[in-house]
Amino acid sequence: MTETLPPNTGFVAAAYLVFVALLLIYVTIMSIRASRLERELDQLLRDEDEEVVVEAVAEETVAEETVAGEAGR
Amino acid sequence: MPTSKRLYGNRLAILAPLATVVVLASLALAFFQAPIEADQGFSQKIIYIHVPLAITTLIGFIYGGICAIQYLRSGDPRDDLRSYTAIHQSLIFCIGALLTGMIWAKASWGQWWVWDEPTLVSFLIVFLLYCTYQPLRFSIEDPERQSRYAAVFAVVAGAFVPLNFIAVRLADPLIHPRVLGTAEGGLTNGMKPAFYLGILGALLLFFTLCRYEMANKHTRAQLRALRRRFGQDAPARAGRSSAPEVPAR
């Protein structure tokens, strides 16, 4: 198979591989950053959910106390 | 309309597939349609990647300078971001042009680098000049001063690029061919479609990656703003950085 390839094929392949490698490195770095953003966003959403649950529990407790107070009177 | 829409629009969704198609088409033309050059043989195929990368690099540096002028006139941080990403991308393309050029030099001339050749050395000077851009930004802590100083640098260096190009064209070439606009450039009619499509593909790829990076930075700024709104400790800027401060809105 090597006999059918034109001379200097290795250099041409190396040049194009450099281009592809640079592109891949760049895209990989950007993907890592994007996944970090995704993680942070997930965390933010979880924090927000927890905050909503805590607020709901607090409101429920206040309501229960009010009802108990009224019944005691 | 949100800033992200104004700044990036839906262009990224159009640019990315378009760049992919044009780059692949230019590579297909280069390998299956363009004839093999009589003098250099198969190694001349490197021209279809090396020259588009080099031309896009120079255009990117000039574009960075133009965005910097806009920033100095308007003070809009988005122009600073455009200038920063253009120069950042151009540096990556510049590394690609230098490496592919070195490989081509080894294949054609038997040497990785020729120090007497003005084209090679001037391109290296431009690369080294722009290598100082990021350290310059990083050395200034105040974001506003950083943006202003970086913009002045981008304008001056951006003006140097075409001057440098003209000076090299006027100088006597040693061995590096002058491809564009010369009779001895060596491009036959069969090579021209692949060559010009290669330049278009590289330019489209450049602007796609610029927008991708800007979108990423903008999303990060929006996330920080959101965290601040929820009362979490998230400064507008993550410590000292060479990257510009991006407005969340």
Image: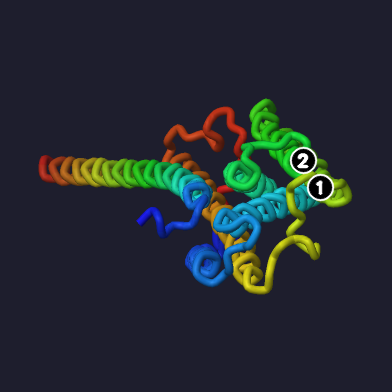
Report the number of numbered marks.
2
Answer with left or right where residue A9 lies relative to residue B36. left
| Residue ID for mark 2 | B117
Asked whether the beta carbons under mark 1 and mark 2 sit within 8 Å of each other, the answer is: yes
Q: The N terminus of chain A is located in which quarter? A: bottom left
User: Which chain is indicated by disc 2?
Assistant: B
Q: Tell me which residue sits at (53%, 46%) in the image.
A: B217
Dividing the picture into quarters, in which one does residue B150 lie? top right
Is residue B37 placed above or below B122 in the rendered structure?
A: below
Establish whether labels 1 and 2 are both on one chain. Answer: yes
* Res. A45 visible in picture: yes
Q: Which residue is mark 1?
A: B173
Crowding around mark 2 (Cα neighbors within 10 Å: few <14, some 14 to 19, many 20+) is some
- Type of amino acid under label 2: Glu
- Of residues B248 and A18, the one nearer the viewer is A18
* Rendering coords of residue A22 (x, y %): 50, 45
Q: For numbered disc 2, what is the local secondary structure?
A: loop
